[in-house]
Image (cartoon, rainbow, N blue to C red):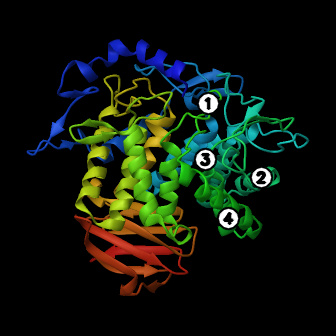
C-alpha cells in the first residue's frame, strides 16, 4: 500500500476509529482483555476470527462490471470501514497466493469445501488476462491493476508476484485436480526461467517490475526471491527437475546478499521506486521457509532468530500490553494485524524448535493482539469486517483477510492451545489436504503428497487409525498433550495419502 493511499485512509477513517486511542482500555472497537498478570488475551476466540472472516469473504458483496457481478476482491484492494465498496487499485497477484494458502488451510480445518470458491474466482480471473504468447513476458499473469474494473490489463507486472501466482496455481491443482492450473503454472515457470540473471548486491536475479510487452526493466531490485524459490520448489516436487538449478541459484543469492546486508526491500505493488524502503514481509517469509526446510538452511538456528530480532527491532518496537505490534514498511510505518500475525506465526514455529517459554509468550501475545482489529463495529450477521490493524483502519482484502487468516491457522499448528479444545480440527499439514470429512468420533482425509505430517486437535481418544486399508503402526502417530495443549494428535505418513481416525464405538 502506498504512503499516500494509506495516510489518506487514516485521515478519512479517523472519526470512526477514534475508539482505538480515546480510551486506554480500548484496542480498536474492543476492550482489552488482560489476565491476572496484566498479559493481553484475545478478545474473542481464534476460531471465531477465522469463521467470521471467512463468512464475510464467502458472502462478499458484488458489483456489476463488464464481466458480471464481481465480488469486490476481484475489483478493488480495499473497502470502507463501514463495509461499503471503495474503488482502488488491486493487488491480485499476491492476493492469489495468500487466498489459496488461506482456503487450503481453512478447508482442512473445517471441511467446508465451498471456501475454495473465492480462490477459484480469483485464479480464473487472473488466468483470463494472461499476456499474449508473442510478448517478451509471454503467458504470464498481470499481478496488479490500477483500474478498479475487474479487468486486469496493466502493462507492467512483478516477476516475484508471477511466482506467487504460479505457486498458487500448483497448490490449487493439488486441491482440485484441475489440470489447467498446472499448465498455467508451467507457463509462468518458463517465463521466469528465461529471465533469470546471476544477480549481485544491487541487482536481484529477477527484476522487481517489468514492462510485459517489451521486457524493459522498470525497477531492478527486490529481495523477494523467496517467492520464486517456493514456486520452483513445488515444481521440482511435481517432477519438473529442470527447475532445481534455478531454485538453488536463487536460494544462494538470498543467503549471499539480503541475509547478510538486510536489504529487505521491494515487495508492495503500489509503492513507487524506493529501493531503501525496507519491510517485514520478505524476511519473515524467508524465515518461514528456513523453518520448513532446515535441510537447505544449515545455519537456521542462528539465522531465524536474527531475522526475528531484525523485524522486531525495525518494525516491532511498539508494545501493547507487552505484545509486539508489527508495522508494515518504512513508507507506511503503521501497526497492522496481518504482519503482527505473520511475525507471531514465525515466532510460534521458532518456539517449536526451542521449546523456550519466552518464545512461546512472544508468539502468544502477538497473536492475541492481532484479534483486536477483527469484527469492527460495522460487522453484522456473524460476518467480520476487519480493520487492517491498530494503526490503519480501512480494510484491505489482503491485510484484513487473505494475508492474515493463514497465519492464524499456522499459529494453531505450532501452538495447538490456540485451537478450540471442544471441537475437532486438522490444524496443519506439510502437504495439501485434498479432501476431509468430520463426523462424531471419526475424521477421514486424503492428501496429495504421499509423504508428510499432520497435526490435529480432537475431542476424542483415537482407538483406530488406518493408513490406506491397513492399521497405521503406532510408531507413526502420537496422541496426548503437546506444547501445553491436550487432545493433540500428530500423524506421520510414509507412502500413504488416505488416513482415517476413529474413536471407540
165 vs 466: above or below: above
Q: Is residue 471 left or right of residue 17?
A: right
Q: Residues within 10 Å of mark 1 (few under 14, many from 20)?
A: few
Distance (Cα) linking label 1 and label 3: 15 Å
**Residue under label 1:** 274
Q: Would you say the residues marked 1 and 3 are in contact, meaning their CB atoms lie under 8 Å apart?
A: no
- Residue 84 lies, in percent from the top left, at 47, 19
Q: Could one spot residue 417 in this view of the protein?
A: yes
Residue, disc 3: 224
Residue that mark 2 sits on: 196
Residue at mark 4 to residue at mark 2: CA–CA distance: 12 Å
Circle 3 SS class: loop
> Which comes before the other along the chain, label 3 or label 4?
3
The foreground one among 130 and 203 is: 203
Q: Earlier in the sequence, mark 2 or mark 1?
A: 2
- Residue 209 occupies quadrant: top right
Amino acid at each position: 500500500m502506498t504512503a499516500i493511499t494509506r495516510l489518506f485512509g487514516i485521515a478519512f477513517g479517523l472519526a470512526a476509529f477514534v475508539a482505538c486511542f480515546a480510551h486506554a482500555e480500548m484496542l480498536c472497537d474492543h476492550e482489552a482483555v488482560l489476565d491476572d498478570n496484566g498479559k493481553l488475551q484475545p478478545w474473542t476466540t481464534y476460531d471465531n476470527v477465522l469463521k467470521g472472516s471467512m463468512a464475510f469473504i464467502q458472502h462478499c458483496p458484488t458489483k456489476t462490471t463488464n464481466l458480471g457481478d464481481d465480488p469486490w476482491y476481484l475489483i478493488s484492494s480495499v473497502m470502507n470501514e463501514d463495509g461499503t465498496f471503495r474503488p482502488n487499485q488491486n493487488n491480485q497477484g499476491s492476493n492469489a497466493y495468500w487466498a489459496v494458502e488461506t482456503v487450503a488451510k481453512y478447508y482442512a480445518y473445517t471441511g467446508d469445501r465451498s471456501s475454495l470458491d473465492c480462490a477459484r474466482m480469483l485464479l480464473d480471473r487472473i488466468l483470463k488476462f494472461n499476456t499474449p504468447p508473442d510478448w517478451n513476458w509471454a503467458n504470464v499473469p498481470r499481478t496488479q491493476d490500477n483500474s478498479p474494473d475487474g479487468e486486469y490489463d496493466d502493462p507492467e507486472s512483478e516477476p516475484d508476484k508471477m511466482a506467487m501466482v504460479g505457486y498458487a496455481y500448483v497448490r490449487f491443482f493439488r486441491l482440485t485436480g484441475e489440470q489447467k492450473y498446472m499448465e498455467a503454472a508451467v507457463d509462468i515457470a518458463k517465463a521466469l526461467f528465461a529471465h533469470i540473471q546471476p544477480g549481485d548486491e544491487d541487482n536481484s536475479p529477477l527484476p522487481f517490475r517489468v514492462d510485459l510487452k517489451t521486457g524493459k526493466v522498470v525497477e531492478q531490485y527486490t529481495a523477494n526471491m523467496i517467492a520464486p524459490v517456493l514456486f520452483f520448489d513445488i515444481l521440482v516436487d511435481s517432477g519438473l527437475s529442470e527447475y532445481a538449478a534455478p531454485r538453488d541459484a536463487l536460494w544462494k543469492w538470498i543467503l549471499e546478499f539480503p541475509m547478510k546486508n538486510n536489504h529487505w526491500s521491494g515487495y508492495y505493488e503500489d509503492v513507487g521506486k524506493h529501493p531503501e524502503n525496507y519491510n517485514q514481509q520478505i524476511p519473515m517469509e524467508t524465515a518461514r521457509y528456513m523453518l520448513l526446510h532446515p535441510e537447505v538452511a544449515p545455519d537456521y538456528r542462528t539465522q531465524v532468530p536474527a531475522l526475528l530480532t531484525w523485524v522486531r527491532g525495525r518494525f516491532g518496537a511498539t508494545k501493547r500490553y507487552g505484545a509486539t505490534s508489527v508495522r508494515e514498511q518504512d513508507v507506511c510505518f503503521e501497526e497492522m494485524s496481518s504482519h503482527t500475525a505473520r511475525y507471531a506465526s514465525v515466532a510460534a514455529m521458532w518456539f517449536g524448535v526451542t521449546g523456550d517459554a519466552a518464545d512461546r509468550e512472544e508468539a502468544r501475545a502477538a497473536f492475541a493482539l492481532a484479534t483486536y482489529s477483527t469484527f469492527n463495529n460495522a460487522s453484522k450477521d456473524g460476518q467480520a469486517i476487519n480493520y487492517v490493524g491498530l494503526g490503519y483502519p480501512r480494510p484491505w482484502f489482503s491485510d484484513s483477510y487473505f494475508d492474515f487468516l493463514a497465519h492464524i491457522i499456522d499459529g494453531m499448528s505450532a501452538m495447538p492451545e490456540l485451537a478450540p479444545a471442544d471441537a475437532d480440527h486438522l490444524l496443519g499439514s506439510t502437504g495439501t489436504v485434498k479432501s476431509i470429512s468430520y463426523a462424531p468420533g471419526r475424521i477421514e482425509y486424503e492428501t496429495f503428497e504421499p509423504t508428510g505430517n499432520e497435526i490435529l486437535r480432537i475431542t476424542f481418544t483415537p482407538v483406530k487409525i488406518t493408513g490406506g486399508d491397513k492399521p497405521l503402526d503406532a510408531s507413526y502417530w502420537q496422541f496426548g498433550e503437546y506444547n501445553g495443549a491436550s487432545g493433540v494428535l500428530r500423524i506421520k505418513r510414509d507412502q500413504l495419502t488416505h488416513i482415517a481416525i476413529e474413536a471407540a464405538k
